[in-house]
Image: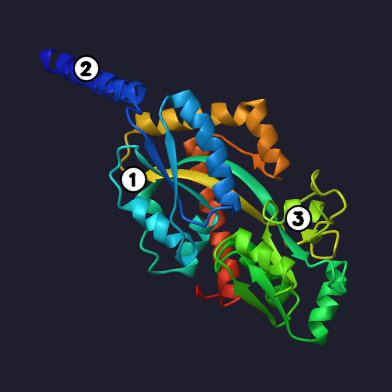
Amino acid sequence: MNRLLGWVFLGLQVFLAAHAIGQTYPAKPVRIIVPFAPGGPTDIVARLLGQKLSESLGQQMVIESRAGAGGNVGTAAVAKSPPDGYSMLITSSAFAVNVSLSPNAGYDPGDFVPVANLAKQANMIYAHPDLPARTLAELLALAKRGKMAYASPGSGTTPHLTAENLFNVTAKLDVTAIHFKGAGQAVVAVMGGEPRVGVGAVSGPLAQIKAGKLRGIAVSSAARLAALPDVPTFAEAGFPGVEDYTWIGMFVPAGTPPAIVQRLNEATNAALRTPELRERLEAVAFEPVGGTPQQFADYLKSEIPKWGRVVRAGNIKIE
């Protein structure tokens, strides 16, 4: 009986200690690593969410961009950080892609604990307004008549894989990807006409499409976007099998105390429920997601093999 009481008392102490960690966290500023260049979709979401978390958690969320190797450089840096909740990763669906794309990425998915799926948005094929193709069918016909290239936000990103799946795997065309360091640089390149076609998550070219400086060709979502109601889906354009999303997720290093993971998840979900953040995300074509760490972990289990199939079908190698 005494031994049983001892175990119960020990269990209670562990529970109270874990609870106390969650309640006192964070006690200092938190570093959020974004493994892509500033101005892209991941950076946009990280900064919007970071502001709300700073307000609710009472500590500054310091956004640090560490681009390189399709997201691997910054991701690997967080994987090697202490599991104390003060180094966090906000990254894109490249996290799931790079398992197949980069055997020596410098990290493994098991190096992280998923905290929350923050938001998602469709990928888009867009073009310079002078391009003599207004529809996806016209664009593909143009590609058949001569060599075509497109701007990508980075090798191995989900927009890149969406384009490869469409152009080279599905349509059997030889279209060349020109990779830039982030969505912002790719958009600028297409606006300058070099090249005149681009692919990216919708938030990248959205403002320039609305301003008439770029033209939306097609989106990879299940339905048309409220922000761009005149741009058809891939399914409407004759490619029902191409339905992809760029998602943005939050991770912490494996071994981070569950109480801290839970506190971050609760604070994140609360932020995603606020009308202000939802409106700001939706204004740049993001759909807030949220949910539990387990729901995000389950989603990752389906995303990793999905993108692996595209990588293998297109024989895609990271550059």
Q: Residue at x 30, y 38 (%)?
A: 84
**Residue behind mark 3:** 208
Residue 312 against residue 42 in the figure, above or below: below
Q: Residue at x 57, y 38 (%)?
A: 48
Pointer 1 local density, CA inside 10 Å: few below 14, some 14–19, many at least 20:
some
Distance Cα–Cα, label 3 vs label 1: 40 Å
**Residue behind mark 1:** 254
**Pick the front one: 54 or 270:** 54
Amino acid carrying label 1: it is Ala
Viewer can see residue 4: yes
Quadrant of the drawing holding the N terminus = top left
144 relative position to 85: left or right: right
**Residue behind mark 2:** 8
Q: Place residue 269 in its image quadrant.
A: top right
Residue 277 against residue 172 in the figure, above or below: above
Is disc 1 in contact with disc 2, using a CB cutoff of under 8 Å? no
Q: Residue at x 60, y 51 (%)?
A: 41
317 relative position to 77: left or right: right
Where does the image place residue 40, in percent across and percent down from the top left?
59, 54
29 relative position to 145: left or right: left
Seen from this angle, which residue lies furthest left? 2
